[in-house]
Amino acid sequence: MNRTLIRATVPALLLLLLLGFAANRPMAVARIKLAALPARDRVDVQLDNGAFTLVEEERIVPLLKSSPEIGNNAIDFSWSNTNVDKDSIQFRPISIREGDKFVAIKKVKINDKTEVDEIGVINVAYPPNENALVWEVFAARACAVKVRVSYLISNFDRYFSYRALADKEETKLSLINYMQIRNYSGENFGNSGIWAGFGEAFTKVIDNQQEIKMLLRRFDNVPVEKTFTMDWYANGALSADKPFASKILMHYKLINDAKNAMGVFPLQPGKVRIFIEDGKGGEAFLGEDVSGLVPLDGEMKIYLGEARDIVCTRTIESNVRSNVRGNLYNQEIIIKYEIENFKPKAATLRIQEHMNNLAAEYFGSLHGDVEWEKGKTTSEEIRIDIEKGGVNPILSVDLAAAPTDKDKKVEKKIVRFHFTIKNLW
């Protein structure tokens, strides 16, 4: 008994259609035909997973009518030199050709009593020692069927990058989001629908060992806030000459929402190259940073480097321990900040404090997060925000611009943060 073999070259993925006997009958070995399977009708590539890429393709496959004499159709899916996750491969008949169009698969009766789909997958087998699998497919009649094959492959990935251009006043910027696709899967993909897992899909030809960089989205006139942050426990002393001053880090802060000319999709992690207009029609390079995932309504912070024109000296002015009862104590602390702004513009300095670190430094071992309260002598100029949890307050202090008259000295602003860390033991 003969069987028909139809071979498709994908190049590393081979989709073979052959007709064999049912599972309970012996397979014949003779082959009477070898022909190329029709090309893919459609290919979609989904890139929302960092480890694997989902490929879904559609083909039109001829099937012979199943019968007790010749059995069911067998479709052989094999691959080499391509990293396919064999447990992810799925085969689904979706429609049957009727004239010049495709119609839904209908129910039919077998032996006038059992109702089944006129096209259906009976089982799947994995040939030993092969990168292949075989689906046994029932066909109630000879027909051309549109089938959908999906699978996961590796070494087909994408990464994201950004280009930020701030205006001269550093109040707005343009943010350009790029996506680069790299195909080293061993498989050529023709005109394929590409979806990053968010935003709109687009069409590209992506061959094996090819890299393509494309514009994903451009955001113009995005409001930006330039921030200056001092964090003693994160950055330590500025230098040996200034042991009580700490580094002040600069960032651009953007909000990923519609109000701020963004908010289309979550911004993926990626490298950010930052530029600024020089006021003469050109651009100056400020530096690079790596941004993490920025969800919708989330905050994107782009690191710009260290500020050299704002100096803040931090000293512990008072540190008093008082007994509450037994081995329970309160630690009352006053921190003095002396701040100088040499910038020609007014600025706001954000001072990050860490209550757990302070308690550990001036009391000793801790038992979880500490409890604290602000003291009465805290300077009125300090605004306290809780952005990173209750034990990590951020103190904001507004600073006047440096005097334009070079003969005048920069004003030194002195503020104090008074607080009590309670119930230490």
Image (cartoon, rainbow, N blue to C red):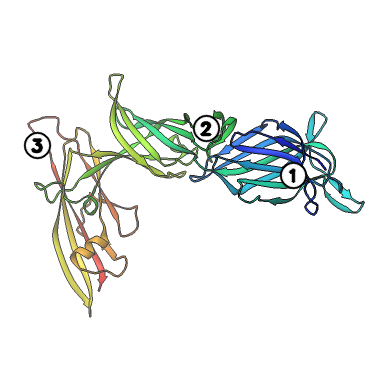
Q: Which amino acid is tagged 2? A: Asn
3 or 1: tag closer to the N-terminus: 1
Query: Where, quadrant-wise, is the N terminus in this rendering?
Result: top right
Q: CA distance from mark 3 to mark 1?
A: 88 Å
The outermost residue toward the top is 281
> At numbered mark 1, what does the secondary structure look like: helix, strand or loop?
strand
Q: Is residue 20 left or right of residue 241?
A: right
The residue located at (80%, 28%) in the rendering is 100
The residue singled out by tag 2 in the image is 208
The residue singled out by tag 1 in the image is 74
Q: Marks 2 and 1: which is nearer the front?
A: 1
Q: CA distance from mark 2 to mark 3?
A: 65 Å
The outermost residue toward the left is 407
> At numbered mark 3, what does the secondary structure look like: helix, strand or loop?
loop
Q: Between residue 253 and residue 15, name the one nearer to us.
A: 15
Residue 49 in picture, x, y percent from top left: 51, 45
Q: Which amino acid is tagged 3? A: Lys
The residue singled out by tag 3 in the image is 409
The residue located at (22%, 52%) in the rendering is 380
Q: Residues within 10 Å of mark 3 (few under 14, many from 20)?
A: few
Q: Which amino acid is tagged 1? A: Ala
CB contact under 8 Å: marks 3 and 1: no
2 or 3: tag closer to the N-terminus: 2
Q: Between residue 33 and residue 101, name the one nearer to us.
A: 33
Q: Is residue 228 left or right of residue 25?
A: left
Q: Is residue 333 left or right of residue 83?
A: left
